[in-house]
Structures are given as structure tokens and as C-alpha cells.
Image (cartoon, rainbow, N blue to C red):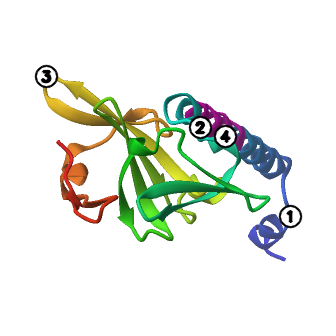
Amino acid sequence: MNMTAIDMHQQTPIDAFIRQEISAISALNDSHLRQILDYSKGFLDKVFPLATGSHKDVCSYVVYYQHLLAFFADGSNSGLQNPAQFVALAGSREKPQSLLLNDNGRHVELTICRSGAQGCKDHAGIDDVQLELQDEQGSRWFSMIMGQLQPTYARRQQRFTAKDGADYRLG
């Protein structure tokens, strides 16, 4: 019998160790992502509070007429404490791809993608929370989930619809 055939069918102690390490790293990554999402939703609770409840408990967001509604697991819902903070969306009102919030001239974008790398692990499908930063170069965006500045070229091509149905332009 060929030695390579035997090696291919038997798991060595090193293979088992590598599998354990990959599993441990994966668990740490999931835990880290949960912490980042919790922190980001805590930020949303402070800057864009709901009338009742917490962004941490939201299962879905929809736009109803000109209002952002957050739905919870028990079927209840809540709007923003300050409804004027919701300014625009991308995608449909029933299943928005992005929600654009504004606090004193600074935008925050919630990217919703239930099949995204982070969104598939979040109850509300939040894949990213991006903050608009103003500096000498103009408007730039920082991803709270990825922890880095985002390329500006992608932002220029993104189209939003204001809550009244008109086009909404950033910057």
C-alpha cells in the first residue's frame, strides 16, 4: 500500500491542532464582531435613540411614509425619538439596503444586508455602520464595523432617496 494514501486518510495530531486553532480563532472573531455591533448599536441608542426600546433589540427596519420604524421580536415597533433624524434610504421602503440618519449636519449610514459578512450574524441584518467625517479633504466615511476609512469613489456613485421621495445627495 502506498504511504501517501494512508497519510491522506489519517488525521495527524498537527491537523487536529490546526482545526482546533481555526475553530478558536473563528469563535474569537464572532465574539469580537458581536462586541463591535453592540458598541455600534449603543452609539445609535445615544445619538439616534428610539422612542421606545434599543437598536440592540431591533429585528428589522422599514420606512413607513416618511418615518423610520424599528420592529422587535415581539412584534412591537418604535420610531426614532426625533423622527427628523431619518433623512434618506437606498433600496425599497420595505427592505432598505441603507438608511441615512443625520444629527446636526453629520450623517450616519446603516448598511443592511442579511447575506453580508456581518449582516448575516445580526438580528436586524446590519452589515455596517458608517460615520461621515469632515476634514480639510471634505467629507469622508469611517466604518465602525471594519474600523477604517472607506474609499470615497464608492460613495460618489451611491444614490439615496429622501424620505419625501426626492433625490438625496450627500455633500
Spatial distance from mark 4 to mark 2, Cα to Cα?
Answer: 8 Å
> Which numbered tag is attached to residue 41?
2
Tell me: 14 left or right of 125: right
Closer to us: mark 1 or mark 4?
4
The 10 Å Cα crowd at callout 4, few under 14, some 14 to 19, many 20 or more, is some
Report the front residue among 1 and 73: 73
Residue under the point 25% across and 35% down: 140
Given residues 52 and 169, the one toward you in this image is: 52
Q: Which residue type carries mark 3?
A: Glu
Asked if residue 142 lies left or right of residue 2, the reply is: left
The residue labelled by disc 3 is: 136
10 Å neighbourhood of mark 3: few (<14), some, or many (≥20)?
few
Residue type indicated by callout 1: Gln
* Region rendered in magenta: 30-42
Q: Are marks 2 and 1 in contact (CB under 8 Å)?
A: no
Nearer the observer, 170 or 24: 170
What kind of secondary structure does the magenta stretch mostly adopt? helix
Q: Which residue has dot 4 on it?
A: 54
First along the sequence among labels 3 and 4: 4
Q: Disc 1 or disc 3, which is closer to the eye?
A: 3
Residue type, mark 2 in image: Lys
- The reply to whether the C-beta atoms of the residues labelled 3 and 2 are less than 8 Å apart is no
Task: Give the x, y percent position of residue 34.
Answer: 67, 40
Task: Specify whether residue 101 is painted magenta.
Answer: no
SS of the residue under disc 1: loop
Q: Residue furthest left?
A: 137
